Each structure stands twice: as C-alpha cells, then as structure tokens.
Amino acid sequence: MEYTVDVLKGKGHIDAHQHFWKYNTPRDSWITDDMVVIRRDFLPEDLLPILQENGFEGCVTVQSDQSEEENFFQLQNADRNDFIKGVVGWVDFRATDIEDRLADLSQYKKLKGFRHILQGESKRDFMLESAFMNGISHLKKYNFTYDILVLPDQLPYVKQFVTQFPDQPFVINHLAKPDIKGQQLTAWKKDMEQISLYRNVSCKISGMVTEADWNCWKAEDFTPYMDTVVNAFGTDRIMFGSDWPVCLLAASYEKTIEIVKNYFSAFSDTEYNKFFGGNAKSFYHL
C-alpha cells in the first residue's frame, strides 16, 4: 500500500523519542571523538522544521542528563514550544524522599514520565535494587510512565523487573539495542518475546541505525528486528522514535524515518497511524 504525503500529514503523528541539549564537554563525555557530528547544541528551533517537513505534529523529548536540572531545562523548552507534547525526565528513584519528589513534579503537566540510563550501570541488575524498585512503585500513583533503557544482556533482569509492577506502564527504548551490525538475533529475540507477554510493556522502534554499521547499513538489516517486535508486541504497543539527533551518527532524519515508513506501508491505515502517533498519545497521555 502506498502512503501519500496527505496521509502522513495532519494525522497527529508524533516522534516519541528525541533529545535536546546544550553541549557541555564534561557532562556530555558520552559523545566520543567518533561522534563529532552531534558534539554541538541541538534545540527546539533545530527540530521544528524537520518535523514539519516530515509531517509530524509534535514530539516527546527524553532526558540525556541524569539530573533534576535536566527536567527543568526540558520543561522550559516544552513550555515555549507547543510542538513538544511531553517530557521524559529523570529523578533519583533511590532517594528516601522519592514520593515527595514525585508529588512535587506531578504539578508539571508536560512531564509524562522518567528514565534512568540503566545501560550505563556497571551493576547490570541495578533496576532490581530494592531502593530503586521502591521509587518505581510510586510512579503509578502520579500517572507517570517509565522508559526502560537497557542493552540486550540486561533483558533477563527487565523481565524480573516488570513482573513486580503489573499496573505500571513501561516502554522499552530502542528495541533494547540489539546488535544489528553483528546480526545477533536469537537470544535478544527470545528475551523480547518473553517480556512482550506483559501487557503493560510497550516498545519503541527507535535507535536502530546507530546499532547498525553507521557507514554502510542497508534497509533490510532492520527487518528481522522490526518483525520480532511487531509480532511480539502487536500494533497497539509499538511507537516510532527518531532518536534525533543521535540518529545523525548514521542517517539523516529523513533516512531514519524512511526505513520504518517503508516497512509499515504494508499495514492498514489504522495500524500505521497508531505506530506513528496514536500509541504514543495513549501511552504518554498527550
């Protein structure tokens, strides 16, 4: 099925995962020498024309710095720009006053949920620490979501984690970053299929190009990974995210979206529009 520009535009499409930052050398040390293309500021005025050119109504911006100052930087961006529909921030879930912090943060209507950079923790089962899980246990009370950012080796712990909170909305970021460059599929696929059995867990089809060979990926490289996620989670629990500007390491915004547009062109209009916005609106209460 061919999708015209008219179908793509004006249908409430949402980019459910992107970032803004003012580049800071010490803080942003994760941006290494081979990532020089993103070693600069990326702000709302940079993204807006790109979204408009690609038929998107808005976006959800996700934290990249683990500080509460990050929340207010992103909320300020959201207050000044209507196209930023929601913010996924950061909070110290292990804090003894975590419920008070969440109660205070619940006053900000565009703050939809939180994320911790679990992929970077040396303790791979960090999410199972009792203090961390105590923090997570308070999210549902304030209608906050939680974005799960992990690598494939952490997926067995994710399964244990989500079983503890059957009513908490979770979304896995970037398909849990499978090794697309190395074509590693079997173990990741098994873990994702098991996690998908928990109906409170969704998955973002995002961040794929940076897990492939940055310089010579092919569109077909991503098909088995998208097949796995779509077959496991169904079309009601998946959502598109560009991971802009990180995607620029391997592809332009247009090339990034072309991969998924072509893949989902075989789906019904309803399924297509759920993936490109409807599911994100429901999950994040946009």
Image: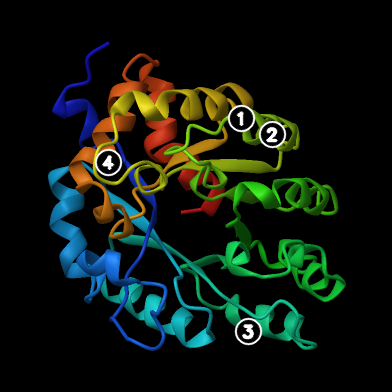
**Residue type, numbered disc 2:** Ser
Distance Cα–Cα, label 3 vs label 1 = 33 Å
Q: Label for residue 233?
A: 1
Residue 153: image location, x then y, percent = 67, 49
Characterize the local packing of mark 1: few (<14), some (14-19) or many (20 or more) Cα atoms within 10 angstroms. many
Give the vertical position of 82 relative to 271 (above or below). Answer: below
Q: Residue at x 34, y 43 (%)?
A: 209
| Of pointers 4 and 3, the one earlier in the residue sequence | 3
Identify residue for label 2.
196
Pointer 4: what residue? Answer: 256
User: What amino acid is found at the position of numbered circle 1 in the picture?
Assistant: Phe
Residue 189 placement, left or right of 284: right
Q: What element does badge 3 sit on?
A: helix
The kind of residue on which mark 4 rests is Thr
Nearest-to-viewer mark from 4 and 3: 4
Assess whether mark 4 and mark 1 are in contact (beta carbons under 8 angstroms). Answer: no
Q: Is residue 246 visible?
A: yes
